[in-house]
């Protein structure tokens, strides 16, 4: 029996303007399905999953032209690198500008923008180190649990950024444009208000009208003589 034999339904857990969280839920109707569900939630392949994460990260790095996260590489300090074997980890010969660095450190040094390569280098190295500590008997120790937490957190952050970065940047750009438009409009309103006040002041000495009659009188003179459009509300 496989996962496909269970009856899965997609359920929306939460949703807002920028994201949706969905989860697949299977209805358990038979004892056989219950056993299958138990197997699927037992995480017997947990460490294989961590290994798969590490391999996936190395694939991303290779696509971007960077070395595998956990590999030692040689580089010349200008962005060029090449793989080395353990036997090559010697001091540079006279005249050689050769340095050594871990692949993850090299990639992160040249991708300071939270790019796919940056995340792949960071997560890939943590996965490799976690597996190395596992081989040394660190499973169950607090620092090892902390490494798992960091890996999970970074993966979720990577997924979220990949899904929403473009729309967030677009929204930020649009908000900036709208803010500039509002600033221009407000400045224009203030300029018009100042021009109306300066034009109305001498007009007040030419009439004895008050209240609504005065407002209509000033509106007519502003539009005819000062060529300043004005509503009764702005005159008040």
Image (tube, rainbow, N blue to C red):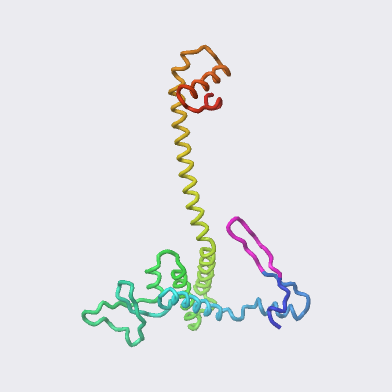
Q: In this view, does 8 lie to the left or right of 62?
A: right
Residue located farthest toward the top when viewing the structure as drawn:
208
Residue lying farthest to the right in this orientation: 30
Q: Which is more toward the observer, 161 or 228? A: 228
**Image quarter (top left, top right, bottom left or bottom right) of the C terminus:** top right
Q: Residue 196 placed where, x, y %?
A: 46, 25
Q: Of all residues shown, which one is farthest toward the left?
A: 94
Q: Compared with residue 93, is residue 24 higher up or lower down, i.e. above or below?
A: above
Q: Residue reaching furthest bottom? A: 87
Residue 132 position, x and y percent, is 47, 81
Q: Quadrant of residue 78?
A: bottom left
Q: Is residue 215 above or below residue 86?
A: above
Q: Residue at x 50, y 13 (%)?
A: 207
- Which residue: 45% across, 65% down? 114
At 46% across and 40% down in the image, what residue appears?
183
Q: x, y percentage for residue 64?
A: 43, 73
Give the x, y percent position of residue 39. Answer: 67, 80
Q: Is the magenta stretch mostly helix, strand or loop?
A: strand
Which of the two residues, 146 or 125, is positioned nearer the viewer here? Answer: 125
> Where are the magenta residues, as a range?
9-23
Quadrant housing residue 80 = bottom left
| Magenta region includes residue 10 | yes
**Quick check: is 5 in the magenta stretch?**
no
């Amino acid at each position: 029996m496989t996962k496909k034999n269970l009856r899965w339904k997609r359920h929306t857990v939460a949703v807002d303007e920028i994201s949706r969280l969905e989860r697949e839920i299977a209805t358990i109707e038979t004892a056989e399905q219950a056993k299958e569900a138990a197997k699927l939630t037992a995480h017997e392949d947990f460490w294989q999953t961590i290994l798969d994460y590490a391999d996936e990260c190395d694939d991303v790095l290779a696509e971007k032209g960077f070395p595998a996260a956990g590999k030692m590489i040689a580089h010349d300090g200008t962005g060029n690198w090449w793989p080395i074997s353990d036997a090559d980890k010697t001091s540079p010969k006279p005249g050689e500008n050769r340095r050594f660095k871990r692949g993850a450190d090299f990639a992160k040094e040249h991708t300071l923008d939270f790019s796919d390569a940056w995340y792949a280098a960071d997560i890939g190295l943590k996965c490799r180190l976690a597996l190395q500590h596992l081989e040394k008997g660190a499973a169950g120790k607090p620092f090892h649990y902390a490494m798992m937490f960091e890996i999970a957190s970074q993966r979720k952050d990577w997924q979220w950024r990949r899904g929403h970065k473009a729309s967030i940047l677009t929204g930020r750009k649009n908000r900036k444009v709208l803010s500039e438009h509002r600033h221009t409009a407000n400045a224009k309103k203030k300029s018009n208000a100042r021009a109306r006040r300066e034009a109305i002041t001498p007009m007040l000495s030419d009439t004895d009208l008050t209240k609504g009659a005065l407002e209509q009188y000033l509106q007519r003179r502003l539009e005819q003589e000062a060529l300043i459009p004005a509503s009764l509300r702005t005159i008040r």
